Amino acid sequence: MLLPLQITFRNLEPSAALEARIRELAQRLERFSAQIVHCHVIVEAPHKRGHQGHLYEVHIQLTTPGGEAIANREHRERRSHEDVYVALRDAFRAVRRQLEDYERERRQDIKHHEPEPTGWISELSPAEDFGHIETSDGRTLYFHRNSVIGSDFDRLTTGTEVRYVEESGARGPQASTVKVVTHPGPIS
């Protein structure tokens, strides 16, 4: 194992088999992230007070360049945690999920959308329900009255700045969606 691993036993005698299992589970975490700087595992057996079995608590603290992942398994009602190996398994599963989330954020596994281009209304034909947009690169795009979103087509004027979504139409490129950015002056 390449990452620094610290194992602490509390209220429990150290066990070579248990320590080997912890090392194995910690090593598996390296499959999910190469960013682990330190791993501290604490296995604790509560003081024996009753006559029935005691439940083990496992605390795992992982340190990465982006922060920490901490798993605490203190299930006082979970009888399955009378077995230290089950408590270990559950704690490592919890910290692995946190580590997977950390890696997704680090890789920025999110979609980025390009901003809509802008242009200006260069021509309006209200009687025929269409207009033209002059794009910032000098092209002219057709748009229909129904493409205007968030504004009234009849209140548009030439020179109005708009954002648009371009698509290929029957007569060439056209704006399928037109949104007003700014009006050139007072709207009457």
Image (cartoon, rainbow, N blue to C red):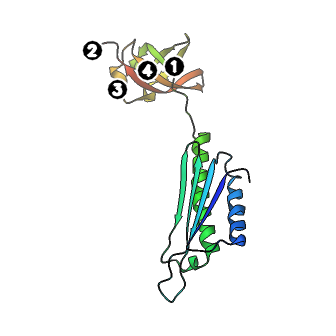
Q: Amino acid at mark 3?
A: Asp
Q: Residues within 10 Å of mark 2 (few under 14, many from 20)?
A: few
Q: Which mark is residue 162?
A: 4
* Disc 1 target residue: 142
Could you tell me how far apart the alpha carbons at marks 2 and 1 are, in whole angstroms? 25 Å
Q: Quick one: label 3 or label 1, which is nearer the N terminus?
A: 1
> Disc 2 to disc 3, how far (Cα)?
15 Å
Does residue 109 appear in this view?
no
Q: Distance between the Cα atoms at labels 4 and 2? A: 16 Å
- Under tag 1, what secondary structure? strand
- Real-space Cα separation, disc 4 to disc 3, in angstroms: 13 Å
**In the image: residue 4, left or right of residue 132:** right
Q: Work out whether mark 4 precedes mark 1 in sequence or the reverse, and give the earlier one.
A: 1
Disc 3 crowd, CA 10 A, few/some/many (<14, 14-19, 20+) = few
Where does label 3 land, which residue? 152
- Left or right of 122? Residue 12 is right
Q: Amino acid at mark 2?
A: Pro
Of labels 4 and 3, the one closer to you: 4
Using residue 160 as the reference point, say whether residue 116 is left or right of it: right
> Residue 54: where, in percent of width, then height?
53, 81
The quarter of the picture where the N terminus appears is bottom right
Horizontal placement of 169 versus 134: left or right? right
